[in-house]
Image: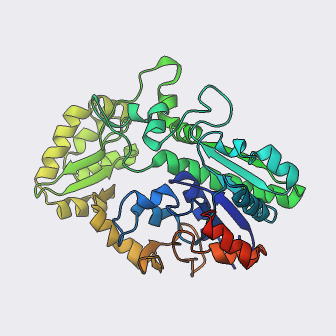
């Protein structure tokens, strides 16, 4: 029994943050009705065609959902949406700032009509404040949150290679909705969840923010290496393979000097005793470690690090991840249907159910006729809605 089975989520969603949040709820069994524009649907459907003609972004965040096309600017389309909301448990939206409220879909108005409804608004900067009406996309929010100040190398900034601000906002929306459902089970009342991409990302910036507390020097951009812990980063072996390794404490450091570097005297060297000293002298220490790696193949280095033991990892390509032996051993890959046929999909992290929900990725408007029938819309009226492009 999936824990959210029986709950209905109506989602006016687009791009990543909203769809990612609702997919987590759908994975747990909630019925998610994705409201899309007639014809084109969610614009993320058209970002690329890399997955059998489908968008990689869309495939990732839209399994387990039903697609209902509605023109909610048409009063008839809005009437259908309001009929849906009358029996929904959650309404989630990440439209442009203020768009939902202008259409009469603000939290106050909706909860006055439906006191048990949980309303979740996801936006770039949240409701209120001078940034409220600003458009926000992932790289823009990464910039505002200071993330670009700590990513990259030297003077060259770099955004994170995934939509980290969208993902952060989606996950906080998901966890906040779960909390609101728990609260409703006690109070009988819904809640308003207001999630900001900026706040979600700044929450994840806790380490660099506190490191730079009260005007202190911020952590430098360190590429793939850790900015303040050393040695913690990639090293290239003699055969060109790159191994990521990490020393976290003095016990590991001593064993690493003895069993990997073959230089036990370095463990107590005043320049390298304690992480702060190793970090301050990382250039000189890096040359010593790099020389040792250069004398080994990547496999030999990994085997030695494991024997120490010191934490290490392979620097994988995306092709490597598709074939990762740990994911295969734990049975994490499953299959979902799609408009282009079956596709591989990763099981939701953390679920103990041996049979995770893996329902298809919907085509645009695939479930419109079924949902209209469920709402009791007469066939003649449904035909008129289709003819007029309302659905």
Front position in the image: 294 or 162: 162
**Image coords of residue 10 (percent x, y):** 69, 62
Front position in the image: 7 or 338: 338
Say which residue appears at 84% left-offset and 61% top-offset.
185
Front position in the image: 346 or 324: 346
Compared with residue 192, is residue 117 higher up or lower down, i.e. above or below?
below
Compared across the picture, whether 219 is left or right of 193 comes to left
- Residue that sits furthest to the right in the current view: 187
**Image coords of residue 59 (percent x, y):** 45, 66
Q: Dividing the picture into quarters, in which one does residue 227 lie? A: top left
What is the quadrant of the C terminus in the image? bottom right
Say which residue appears at 46% left-offset and 79% top-offset.
334
**Image coords of residue 174 (percent x, y):** 64, 56
Compared across the picture, whether 339 is left or right of 108 comes to left
- Residue that sits furthest to the top in the current view: 215
Compared across the picture, whether 253 is left or right of 349 comes to left
Say which residue appears at 58% left-offset and 77% top-offset.
357
């Amino acid at each position: 029994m999936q824990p959210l089975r029986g709950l209905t989520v109506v989602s006016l969603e687009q791009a990543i943050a909203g769809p990612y949040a609702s997919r987590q709820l759908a994975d747990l069994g909630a019925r998610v009705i994705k409201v899309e524009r007639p014809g084109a649907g969610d614009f993320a459907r058209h970002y690329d065609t890399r997955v059998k003609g489908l968008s990689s972004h869309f495939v990732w965040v839209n399994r387990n959902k039903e697609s209902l096309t509605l023109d909610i600017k048409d009063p008839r389309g809005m009437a259908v949406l309001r009929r849906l909301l009358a029996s929904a448990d959650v309404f989630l939206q990440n439209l442009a700032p203020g768009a939902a409220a202008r259409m009469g879909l603000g939290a106050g108005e909706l909860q006055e009509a439906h006191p048990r409804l949980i309303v979740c608004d996801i936006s770039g900067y949240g409701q209120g404040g001078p940034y409220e009406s600003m458009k926000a996309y992932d790289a823009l929010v990464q910039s505002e949150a200071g993330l670009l100040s700590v990513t990259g190398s030297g003077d060259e900034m770099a955004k994170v290679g995934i939509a980290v601000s969208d993902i952060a906002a989606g996950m906080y929306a998901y966890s906040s909705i779960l909390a609101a459902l728990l609260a409703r089970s006690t109070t009988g009342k819904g809640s308003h969840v207001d999630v900001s991409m900026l706040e979600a990302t700044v929450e994840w910036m806790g380490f660099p923010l506190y490191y730079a507390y009260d005007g202190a020097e911020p952590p430098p951009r360190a590429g793939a290496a850790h900015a303040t812990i050393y040695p913690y980063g990639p090293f290239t072996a003699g055969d060109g393979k790159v191994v990521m390794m990490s020393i976290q404490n003095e016990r590991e450091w001593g064993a690493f000097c003895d069993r990997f570097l073959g230089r036990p005297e370095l463990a107590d060297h005043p320049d390298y005793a304690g992480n702060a000293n190793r970090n301050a002298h990382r250039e000189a220490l890096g040359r010593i470690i790099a020389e040792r790696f250069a004398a080994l193949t990547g496999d030999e280095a990994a085997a030695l690090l494991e024997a120490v033991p010191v934490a290490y990892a392979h620097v994988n390509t995306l092709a490597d991840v598709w074939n990762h032996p740990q994911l295969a051993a734990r049975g994490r890959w499953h299959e979902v249907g799609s408009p282009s046929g079956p596709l591989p999909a990763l099981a939701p992290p953390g679920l103990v159910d041996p049979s995770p929900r893996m329902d298809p990725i919907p085509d645009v408007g695939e479930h419109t006729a079924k949902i209209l029938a469920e709402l009791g819309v007469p066939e003649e009226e449904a035909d008129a809605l289709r003819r007029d492009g309302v659905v």
